[in-house]
Structure formats: C-alpha cells, structure tokens
Image: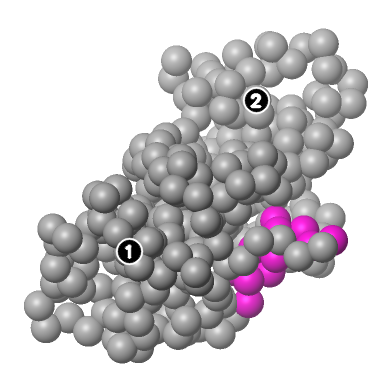
C-alpha cells in the first residue's frame, strides 16, 4: 500500500511517517523542490511505478500536492498544475493509495514551525499561512471523494488511524486497487478504453501535453462533468500489441470505447460499450466539433 502524507511545515508529517515505519512501512520518498532541469511529473510517475514493483508498503513524506502548493506560494509557479496532479492521483489511487492531510490548527502549526525555524524551508509566517490554507482548499476541491482523510494530532489519537490491535491501518482506510494496465479510481463507474499506448509504461491517456490526445480527452471529460472518483482508463492493446482482457476489468462499469479498435475488441470479448470517436481523430480532423464531443460524453454520463 502507498501512503502519502501531506501538509504544511509543522503539521506532524515526519512524526506520523515514523509511526508508519514502526508498523512495517518503508519510508520511500521525501519530496524536495525541483532540481535544475528536473521534470517533477516524471519524477513522481517513476517513483510510484518503482514503489509498485517492490510490492512493499511504503510511505511518502510529501508528494505531488507539495510541489503544487509550495511552488505556487513560494515561487509563483509550479510544475504540478491541477491536470498533472489529477493524472498522478489516477496512478496512485489505482494502486490503492491513501492520502493523509496533516492539518492541525494553524496556531499549532505556527508554534511548531517557530520552534525549529532555522531548519525550515519557509521563513516567513505569511507564506506559511498561505500554504496552510492552500492545503485545506486543495483537499476539499480535489480529494473530497477519493481515498483521503485529514489528521489532526491535537484531537485524534493514532488509534483513529491504525485501530486497536491492527499493525498497519484501520480497515476503513484500506482501499481497493485496479488491475495492471488500468489507472483511475478503483470505484469508477465509467471505464474509458483507448487503443494502445505509445510508451513502454503503458498508461492510458497519461499526459498533460497540449499536443497529445490525452490532454484533449481529459479536458473534454472534465468539461462534460465527470469527477475523478468515478472514472478509470485503460487501453484495448498493451504496448507490445497483445490484447488486454477488457472483460476482467469491466466489472459492470459503463464502458466508453474510444475509436474503432477499442470498440471491436470490446465487442469481440462481449463487453457492452458506448462508442465514441478516438480523441486523437477529433483533435486532428474534427476540432470544430469539440463542443459536440463534450456533449456526447455528457450524454454518456446521463446528463
């Protein structure tokens, strides 16, 4: 299982990380500002995939939300915008991740921060206050229905997280995961099926580049009203060209097949689906019909 600990300086993340380590988790990552020339989106992606391969229970002390919040407040820019954050979350949550936002009262955070100010990255309280409120806003906007929770150590005991006699986590925080080759929410109502990834890591529509069909599709999906907790993504063909078993992934979800290849494979496997043009085709040849494409996706959602 992957645990992501988030929150401002002085919120108790490192202390909580140590508690996870006591319970058998490995401290796999501690986030820092981007190094010169570093692509944080790639760093986070590779870190998640690396953690998955080990098969261990791991805890991350800060991750993509930190770059989003701290970058915007401290540098006025960030490598992880909302689109990149949602993509990273799709990969995390497909692996059964839990995000814990450490958010004790602001006055507690301030007191802890001042007690070790010489060692802190943030040196100005007005910045720390902005960071604190940015985390609260981000949690309510992007994590409300994902497998995420807030932890206030001044009011909650560790037992509220770990349970009594449970060595790792209270059962209510244990999440489902998706099969290999599928990203998104394990509780998704809708499964978008594309054709084939053009890169070995085989992640469906995992790009925020404006020149890629993934970006076009994701923007259309969000405009059509889909929420991240209700969607998942896969490709009908693996990177090596072999056919993926969509029926094993289907599990009663509403399948939206994007393009003829995805539709034919769904049909051959007896998977009921709604047919939509592949976003790459619409982006290249039917860009003027983009509004119609969004309306079609909205109709598939039942609106």
> Does residue 36 appear left or right of residue 3 in this picture?
right
Assign the magenta stretch its main secondary structure: helix
Q: x, y (%) of residue 95? A: 48, 65
> Does residue 136 appear left or right of residue 79 in this picture?
left
- Find out whether residue 122 is within the magenta segment: no
Of the two numbered discs 2 and 1 in the rendering, the one whose residue sits closer to the viewer: 1
Pick the residue in front: 290 or 169.
Answer: 169
Q: Residue at label 2? A: 220
Image point (53%, 56%), residue name: 122
> Does residue 30 appear left or right of residue 267 in this picture?
left
Give the quadrant of the N terminus. bottom left
Pick the residue in front: 244 or 182.
Answer: 182
Q: Residue at label 1? A: 112
Give the spatial CA distance, label 2 vs label 1.
43 Å
Q: 10 Å neighbourhood of mark 1: few (<14), some, or many (≥20)?
A: some
SS at circle 1: helix
Q: x, y (%) of residue 130? A: 46, 40
Instruction: State which region is magenta.
Output: 37-50
Image point (25%, 73%), residue name: 169
Whether 181 is drawn above or below 106: the answer is: below
């Amino acid at each position: 299982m992957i645990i992501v600990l988030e929150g401002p300086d002085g919120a108790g993340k490192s202390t909580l990380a140590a508690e996870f380590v006591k319970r058998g988790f490995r401290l796999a990552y501690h986030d820092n500002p981007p190094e010169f020339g570093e692509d944080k989106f790639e760093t986070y992606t590779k870190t998640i995939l690396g953690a998955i391969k080990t098969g261990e229970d791991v805890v991350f002390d800060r991750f993509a939300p930190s770059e989003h919040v701290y970058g915007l407040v401290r540098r006025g820019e960030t490598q992880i915008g909302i689109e990149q954050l949602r993509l990273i979350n799709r990969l995390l949550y497909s692996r059964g991740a839990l995000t814990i936002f450490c958010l004790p009262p602001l006055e507690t955070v301030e007191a802890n921060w001042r007690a070790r100010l010489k060692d802190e990255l943030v040196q100005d309280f007005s910045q720390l206050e902005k960071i604190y409120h940015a985390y609260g806003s981000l949690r309510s906007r992007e994590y409300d229905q994902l497998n995420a929770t807030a932890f206030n150590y001044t009011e909650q005991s560790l037992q509220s997280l770990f349970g009594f006699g449970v060595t790792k986590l209270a059962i209510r925080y244990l999440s489902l995961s998706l099969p290999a080759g599928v990203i998104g929410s394990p509780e998704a109502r809708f499964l978008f099926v594309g054709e084939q990834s053009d890169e070995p890591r085989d992640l469906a529509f995992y790009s925020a580049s404006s020149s890629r069909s993934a970006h076009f599709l994701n923007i259309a999906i969000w405009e059509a009203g889909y929420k991240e907790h209700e969607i998942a993504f896969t490709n009908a063909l693996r990177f090596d060209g072999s056919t993926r078993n969509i029926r094993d992934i289907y599990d009663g979800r509403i399948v939206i097949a994007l393009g003829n290849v995805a539709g034919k494979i769904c049909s051959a496997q007896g998977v009921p689906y709604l047919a939509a043009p592949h976003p790459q085709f619409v982006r290249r040849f039917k860009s003027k019909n983009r509004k119609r494409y969004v309306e079609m996706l909205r109709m598939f959602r039942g609106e």
